[in-house]
Each structure stands twice: as structure tokens, then as C-alpha cells.
Amino acid sequence: GLDYVDHLMTHFLSDWDQKYASVERRQEEWLALEVIYKGGEAWSIGFSHYCSNHILDIIDVADIFPSINQVEYHVGSQDIDDVREACRLYGITFMSFSPLCGPCEYEPDDSLIHGKLVSEIATHYQHNGKNVTGSQVALRYVVQQGIPVIPKSNSATHIESNKDIFDFELSSDDMNQLAAATKPAAEAGDC
């Protein structure tokens, strides 16, 4: 029953079979989002999975610059498609999706919830008299870089835990150790 949405984004830059990806289709799709934005039906517009070259495709035709680019980013992923700088350059918020590596394949030791690295670092911290968890370390690592996160959860307990990452700060040594991790790895886009 709303007249608008807060944010509208295109999720992927082609069809799922990747048969119809092209600069022209990306630009056409973006211009359609701009019509929705200019009509007041969306207060901001953006995209997900866009690499630097895809962003440039949009900048070439945009009257309205994208507000957000959601990209897989977490401990171990690195900036796999080198997109953070392009987002910074054009004032696009770089947002982490899958900050706990939900769709990733990894060994149990590399888990961002109970894995060895995040669990060991978690032992260095407490909040509200409780031990910090590995997943809180993984989320705090991303947020502490100024990157918003959208962790998925169907559990009220996990949602509560996910929000309890703002009353501790990771040390620079711990941040560096997390930044150096290469597992769990992310999957590169079609850049």
C-alpha cells in the first residue's frame, strides 16, 4: 500500500544464463530505474554485483548516480573485483552482502561464524559482560571499515547478536590479520 519504496536496485547485470548481458542492456535498465526515481516511486536507486566497468557503463548515461552497489565482501574475500575504489570515486556506497559468507563453500576452519580465525580473535573481546562471537568479529571487521552489511538471519537470537557489534572495536593488529585472510574466498564477477 505504499506510494514509494526507500530503495530500488537491479540485482544482477544480466539474465541468469548470462546470454543477454551487454552495455546497452545495463544502460537501458538503469534509465528505467531513473524513471521510477524521478516519478517519486523510489527514494534511491542502485545495483548489486556491478564491477568497475559496469559502473562506468551506468555513469556514461546517468542523470541520477547510483546510491548503493551491493557486492560480496567479507573476511577472506578481499576486494575481488577491485570495485571499492570506483564506488568511492563516484560517491556510491559500497555495501557488503553475504558478510558471513552464506553461499560460500569453505572448510569448517574457515567459517566466519565458528571458524578458527574469527573465533580466536573473538577471545580478545567482550561486550556487555559476554564473550564476542566469531560472527560478530566477521561483521565488525566489515563495519569498522565503514562498509554497511546486510547479514541474513531467520533467527531472532542471531539478529540480536548481529546488532551487538557496535560496542567493541577490533584492534589494528586484528584488523590486519582479518584483512590478510584469503579464505573463505569470494567468487569473482564477470568483470
Image: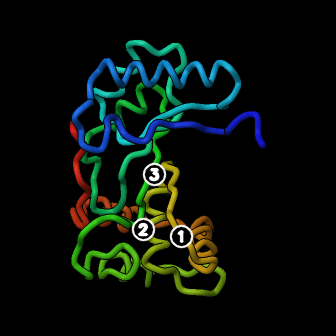
Of helix, strand and loop, which one carries label 3?
Answer: loop
The image quarter in which residue 112 lies: bottom left
Q: Which mark is residue 25?
A: none
Task: Name the amino acid type tagged 3.
Answer: Gln
Q: Nearer the viewer, residue 123 or 87?
A: 87
Q: On the rendered structure, is 73 left or right of 110?
A: right
**Nearest to viewer (mark 3 / mark 2):** 2
Disc nearer the start of the sequence (2/1): 2
Q: Nearer the viewer, residue 5 or 54?
A: 5
Label pair 3/2, CB-CB below 8 angstroms: no
| Residue occupying image coordinates x 24% and y 38% | 18
Of helix, strand and loop, which one carries label 2?
Answer: helix
Disc nearer the start of the sequence (3/2): 2
Mark 3 burial class by Cα count in 10 Å: few <14, some 14-19, many 20+: few
Q: On the rendered structure, is 10 left or right of 173?
A: right
Q: Position of residue 82 (x, y in %)?
A: 27, 39
| Residue occupying image coordinates x 65% and y 31% | 42
The residue labelled by disc 2 is: 138
Mark 2 burial class by Cα count in 10 Å: few <14, some 14-19, many 20+: many
Question: Quick check: 182 above or below 117?
Answer: above
Q: Which mark is residue 153?
A: 1
Q: Which mark is residue 145?
A: 3
The image quarter in which residue 85 lies: top left
The image quarter in which residue 56 lies: top left
Q: Position of residue 76 (x, y in %)?
A: 27, 62
Question: Quick check: 132 above or below 13?
Answer: below
Q: Position of residue 80 (x, y in %)?
A: 25, 47
**Nearest to viewer (mark 1 / mark 3):** 1
Q: Position of residue 61 (x, y in %)?
A: 42, 12
